Amino acid sequence: MRDVLVLLLFSYGAIKALKNPYYGALLWVWIGVMNPHRLGWGFAYTMPFALASVAITAVSMFAHSKEVRWPSGGPVVVLILMVIWMGLTTALAIHSAESLTVYIDVLKVMLMLVVTASVVRTREQILGLIGVLVISIGYFGAKGGIFTLTTGGSQRVWGPAESPIEGNNELAVALIVMIPLAYYLTLQADTALRLPVLKKLRKVWFNRGLYVLMGLTALSAVGSQSRGALLAISAMSAMLWWRSKSKLAIGLALLVMAPAVFMFMPEEWTSRMNTIKTYEEDKSAMGRINAWTMAINIANSRPVGAGFVTDTPFIYQMYAPDPDFVIVAHSVYFQILGQHGYIGLLLYLLFWFLTYRTAGRLESLAKGRADLEWVQQLGAMFKVSLIGFAVGGAFLSLAYWDMPYYLMVILVATDLWVRQHLAEAGNGSTGQPAEQNVPRNMRVTGSGMIQ
């Protein structure tokens, strides 16, 4: 039954995609982030949905070239430079054949990021992409939250099989990154409910559903028993409180929820979280330090790094303090450092810095403008998500996982929309836009709602 449902949903999306490449991009995002075909056990499990979505999107882009525009912005430029540098490090990799295989996979993901950025143009499309990300990860948040409640937190929550977020730690970071996006949808409920698929839904139930989803998702992240997730959700909660206008309400909610979670979770969970303070006695933590030290040794010895494949006995024998403890990097930063050297790490950090700065610029451009309130809120909430990934990613090998990169895509698309909107308004970056200069399909009322 699940296989049939996935096939029907994909077929519907494919038909829509042939009329507009934007829907092809949404198909790709849905398949890549959620991996819905991995939730069944029949014919759909091995079907090449990702390849099909790429082909459909490409055909639609050629057929509807007016709906496509080349994305611009600092993050896009640095992303391209990063991909080029990775090509060089792959050519000079220690395990060149294996690294080339990984590079091709990474290249596909990065290419589709640019494709997605080239077809997301309107406010509704930006909101739709955010909605797909929330649904794709929120499914596992709701499922995991219910599982944690029914089991009393005694068992770990895991992600979809054979996906980048299959592990409990990886899934936890995905859930944490998603929560601010879901909260942003509650702020944009009026606009979201104007979308065709949501027209019949009442705002109160839309928001209540999202609040329940956020609660279950947070519980699911805690139920993953990931120590990195606990640090990430703490950092994200602090950032969310700081960026929110309702500091008192959110602060009280956090003060109530935090002790409740600690009392609900079993003793095994508390003991595991306490090992953060005694990492010297934890084998897993010491293994990560061993891997991180090896990454530094590789970068010091090889300016181009070792290539995409570093977790092998051969490389550990050459560079690791403990050559017999072979694991993956367990950190996006040390993963990039060991694989692509200091230049690769510099490009990676620059990419995320520029992405974060884009969110800040959107906040500044929209400040004090009722017609751009949605942009200011987007910039603020995306900063929270980026902080969650920055902290959670410090303990996981998720450097090439595509979901955080879609935050960049949305920010770049929003930045271009804002610049066009301000240009059409004809009054710079401050004050209210001239109503007659705003396109009819984007006309905004004083409350910030689309007419």
Image (spheres, rainbow, N blue to C red):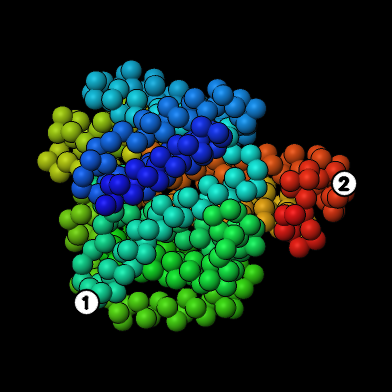
Question: Image quadrant for the C terminus?
Answer: bottom right
> Which residue is found at the position 37% from the left and 48% from the top?
34
Disc 2 target residue: 436
Considering only vertical position in the picture, is 149 above or below 2? below
Q: Position of residue 101 (x, y in %)?
A: 28, 25
Q: SS class of the residue under badge 1?
A: helix
- Local packing at callout 2 (Cα closer than 10 Å; few below 14, some 14-19, many 20+) is few
Give me the disc on residue 267.
1
Q: Tell me the kind of residue under disc 1.
A: Glu
Q: Is residue 278 visible?
A: no
> Which residue is found at the position 80% from the left and 39% from the top?
423
- Local packing at callout 1 (Cα closer than 10 Å; few below 14, some 14-19, many 20+) is few
- Give the residue furthest to the top: 91
Q: Tell me the kind of residue under disc 2.
A: Gln
Q: What is the distance, in whole Å, between disc 1 and disc 2 at their CAs?
A: 63 Å
Q: SS class of the residue under badge 2?
A: helix
Q: Nearer the viewer, residue 163 or 304?
A: 163
Q: Position of residue 393 (x, y in %)?
A: 38, 49
Q: Position of residue 140 (x, y in %)?
A: 34, 58
Q: Is residue 84 visible?
A: yes
